[in-house]
């Protein structure tokens, strides 16, 4: 995989409509920022190589490098990636109650990591009305405020970049596979900087098959005459459900999932990762019982946190059925196949996609490129 710079990022990914607003390229330098759910270049940059390009999960993922760096093991193309154990899990009897998406495993793990000094702070995704808002948390109460899934794409990785740039270390982060892939690549120090320090204490990934464009979803709500500020929560139940559920002051409103899916970001179609392969721990729904989670333990660090959370009564784990693992493997395999087919269609697997572009950056002082 060739390391290129902001010109190629701008032309191939941002203008190519492949960006999923993960935020991994933003807030690494003074030029690329996340603003209103989009990535904006506030000053042009003519560097031939940049961390922004390296971090972007859409420019290519070097699985060999990531596997060696994160797990000290050669990459093997298992659809679920490298893992040590898989469990069903949910919050334990000593955990505080909250409005969790599923079993509350993610919140329980973050609280355990904070309480036991595994991390000092965590980057999570809260919300401002219906829009997701990345934020830094340091207390269990703040972790609970961020519980539940926001189905609109969020630049969570940019908030992590900002914290790391400001010198924070011992950080936790929860994010979708694209956000966590960007973070994982940055942790390999792709530009071999001499001042590099890995800022991470624990990285927790979420399973993901798609996220909505904020702009697209707001315009759909407008068509439906729904005031976004009146939405208290939004739930997208797993198949075979056909409707999303919006909780409004006057009650629950159902919206057809077929219509909602039309607002999925185009860049999600080329995303091969369903289970957040490049993390310490990955968490998703447990298909047969959404009150529980599926928990994939990938690293030694992840395993140590799970053991400590169980000992503290914050987490409950049980053996998972082979049927659940088989179904998850099939879903992950199918997502990867669909993504590779889409990448092929869009020319992303063509060697020319990795060649430098002969374009001089426009000398703008401010604006989207
Ligand atoms: C966009 C999206 C799509 C998903 N798709 C699937 C799927 O197809 N299959 C599946 O099994 N699971 C999916 N999940 C994960 C699932 O919804 C739950 O997050 C997961 O099961 C953990 O549940 P929990 O009860 O432990 O989480 P909780 O304890 O409720 O914690 C949820 C955590 O999610 C984080 N979060 C919320 N929204 C976002 C966001 N937009 N970006 C980054 N982080 C966020 C918060 O910081 C919070 O810490 C998806 C999640 C998201 C955000
Ligand atoms: S996908 Fe992420 S890293 Fe790539 S351009 Fe978009 S925000 Fe930046
Ligand atoms: S499908 Fe992939 S690209 Fe889209 S939000 Fe989920 S992890 Fe990101």
Image (cartoon, grey):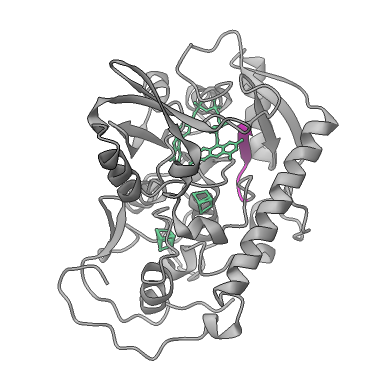
Q: Position of residue 139 (x, y in %)?
A: 39, 23
Residue 275, image quadrant = top right
Q: Position of residue 119 (x, y in %)?
A: 48, 34
Q: Where's ligand 2: which quadrant?
A: bottom left
Identify the residue shown where x is 44% and y is 70%: 53
Q: Quadrant of the N terminus?
A: bottom right
As drawn, the residue found furthest toward the bottom would be 358
Identify the residue shown where x is 48% and y is 60%: 267
- Residue 62 visible? The answer is no
Q: Is residue 280 magenta?
A: yes
Q: Is residue 189 magenta?
A: no
- Residue 360 visible? The answer is yes
Identify the residue shown where x is 78% and y is 53%: 78
Magenta-tinted stretch:
278-284
Q: Position of residue 62 (x, y in %)?
A: 62, 67
In the image, residue 351 above or below residue 307: below
Residue 362, image quadrant = bottom left
Residue 311, image quadrant = top right
In the image, residue 161 above or below residue 347: above
């Amino acid at each position: 995989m060739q390391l290129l710079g902001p010109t190629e990022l701008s032309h191939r990914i941002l203008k190519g409509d492949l960006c999923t607003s993960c935020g991994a390229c933003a807030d690494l330098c003074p030029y690329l920022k996340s603003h209103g759910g989009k990535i904006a270049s506030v000053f042009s940059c003519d560097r031939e190589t940049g961390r922004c390009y390296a971090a972007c999960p859409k420019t290519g993922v070097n699985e060999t490098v990531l596997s060696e760096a994160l797990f000290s093991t050669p990459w093997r193309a298992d659809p679920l990636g490298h893992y040590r154990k898989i469990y069903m899990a949910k919050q334990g009897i000593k955990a505080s109650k909250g409005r969790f998406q599923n079993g509350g495993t993610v919140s329980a793990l973050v609280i355990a990591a904070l309480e036991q000094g595994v991390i000092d702070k965590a980057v999570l995704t809260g919300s401002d009305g219906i829009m997701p808002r990345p934020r830094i948390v340091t207390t269990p109460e703040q972790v609970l405020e961020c519980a539940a899934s926001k189905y609109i794409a969020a630049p969570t990785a940019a908030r992590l970049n900002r914290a790391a740039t400001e010198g924070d270390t011992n950080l936790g982060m929860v994010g979708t596979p694209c956000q966590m892939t960007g973070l994982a690549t940055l942790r390999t120090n792709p530009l071999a900087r001499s001042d590099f320090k890995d800022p991470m204490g624990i990285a927790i990934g979420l399973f993901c098959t798609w996220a909505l464009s904020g702009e697209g979803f707001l315009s759909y709500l407008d068509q439906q005459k729904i005031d976004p500020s009146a939405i208290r929560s939004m739930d997208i139940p797993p198949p075979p459900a056909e409707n999303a559920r919006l909780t409004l002051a006057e009650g629950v409103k159902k919206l057809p999932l077929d219509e909602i899916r039309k607002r999925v970001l185009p860049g999600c179609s080329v995303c091969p990762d369903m289970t957040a392969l490049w993390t310490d721990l990955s968490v998703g729904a447990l298909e047969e019982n959404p009150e529980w989670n599926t928990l994939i333990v990938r690293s030694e660090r992840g395993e140590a946190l799970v053991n400590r959370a169980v000992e503290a009564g914050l987490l409950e784990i049980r053996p998972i059925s082979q049927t659940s693992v088989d179904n998850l493997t099939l879903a992950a395999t199918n997502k990867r196949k669909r993504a590779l087919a889409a990448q092929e269609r869009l020319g992303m697997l063509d060697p020319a996609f990795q060649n430098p572009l002969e374009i001089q950056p426009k000398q703008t002082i401010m604006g989207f490129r």
